[in-house]
Amino acid sequence: MNTITANPHVTATFSPPVMRAREWIAGRTFPPDRPLLNLSQAAPTAPPPAQMRQAMAEIIMNDPGAHLYGPVLGLPELREAVAERWSQDYGGRIVSDQVAITSGCNQAFCAAVASLARQGDNVILPTPWYFNHRMWLEMSGIETRALPVRDRMFPDVAEAERLIDAHTRAIVLVTPNNPTGAEYPAGLMRAFLELARRHGLALIVDETYRDFHSSDASPHDLFTDPDWHDTLIHLYSFSKAFRLTGHRVGAVTAGAGLMVQIEKFLDTVTICANQLGQRAALYGLRHMSDWLRGERSEILSRKALIDGLIDTLDGWERLGSGAYFAYLRHPYDMTSDQLTQRLVAEQSLLVLPGTMFAPEGTDGFAEATLRVAFANAGEEGLRQMAHRLAAFTP
């Protein structure tokens, strides 16, 4: 009897880490005086604010287009609004033809890579990496060239250049970074743009968490380069900004020539992004800037609190923090995978091990680190996290 054979690139790809971590808590009962504190997932757990939900309800009832197929590259008004906002925020010139709306930022990444690279090519990812980026490359038969971060969790330009060969198609940067929280300086971003341009590569910049950057200034000046579109591909997520996680709305900004290829991918995969979500994102851009500034302020206050709490823990080291994340080095003679599972069992605390964000053989770095996604924990939750880490005994 014949059996179905799965794609070997997919079977070789590791399982989704957040789903694996959920298996550690499945069926487990936690004591009433120490309920589960889940700091594993970097996504809002609350619905959009009431103001936006009311607008969405009115859209559902009164806008027939919200229920139909729309343009493959996105709602024209939303593409125009993104182009205008990005031009304003980054001090460059972006037009709507250089913007596509996607089903979340993950799809923006997949569309960009599918438009650039094929099986046998390679893409450079700083490690620790965002695991879904690695998963898509692996499923596509594209080699991942790991670029270990160094001081302050920053990737090194010279080290990246040594990884480039004739099959390299792109360099990927995520800032503020998932998982480390590091915010890459503008000068470092510019240096990577120049490196990519010298070698004829794309520089893919994922700014999913840009709305929670600690600086009030523009995080980089890449769009001020008049020829940015020959090298830069920019990714964004409305999910984090307006809590639209379930509506799947992201954006990719790139040269008009590449957009032709991206359109093929999007038409084949989803035809169009969620119509209600696109309209909600447009409403957010037009009416909720003050609300979003308040969300940013709250996240920055949580960052300041967790920084202070971690820095007082004996033996623990805070390697990076920013946006939704703190990246920590633990002091124990065990792997981070072992530690995080014991933290679930003994301290009712779920965080992710560094081994989920790196390839095997990282000179012990991944095994000694873990990621805390603190955005969904209030002050009491963060103090509980620090208390439970301090109470753990190896």
Image (cartoon, rainbow, N blue to C red):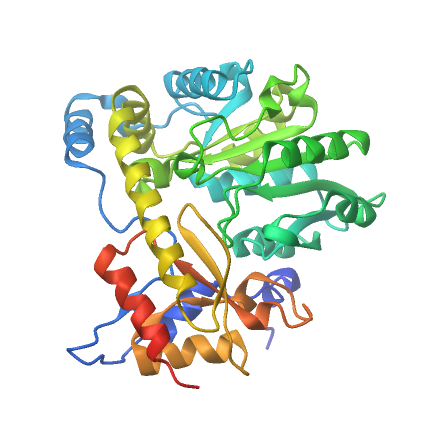
- Of all residues, the one furthest to the right in this rendering is 166
Q: Quadrant of residue 189?
A: top right
Along the line of sight, the residue nearer the viewer: 218 or 258: 218
Going by the picture, which residue comes out furthest to the bottom? 394
Q: How many callouts does the rendering have?
A: 0
Residue 300 can be seen, yes or no: yes
Q: Position of residue 36 (x, y in %)?
A: 25, 71
What residue lies at 39% left-to-right and 17% top-to-bottom? 81
Q: Where in the figure is residue 76, as x and y percent of width and height? A: 41, 17
Q: Could you tell me which residue is drawn at 67 percent across and 30 percent down?
A: 190
Residue 149 is at least partly visible in this image: no
What is the quadrant of the C terminus in the image? bottom left
Front one among 304 and 363: 304
Picture quarter with the N terminus: bottom right
Q: Residue 99, percent across and down?
A: 51, 23
Left-right relation of 249 to 121: left
Please name the residue shown 25% across and 61% down the image: 381
Residue 364 location, x and y as percent? Answer: 64, 72
Up-down: is 240 above or below 132? above
Q: Is residue 196 above or below residue 356?
A: above
Q: Is residue 239 left or right of residue 5?
A: left
Location of residue 173 with respect to 286 vertically, above or below? below
Q: Nearer the viewer, residue 365 or 252?
A: 365
Q: Residue at x 42, y 19 (%)?
A: 85
Q: Taking 305 as reference, is 12 left or right?
A: right
Quarter occupied by residue 80: top left
In this view, the residue in front, 377 or 269, is 377
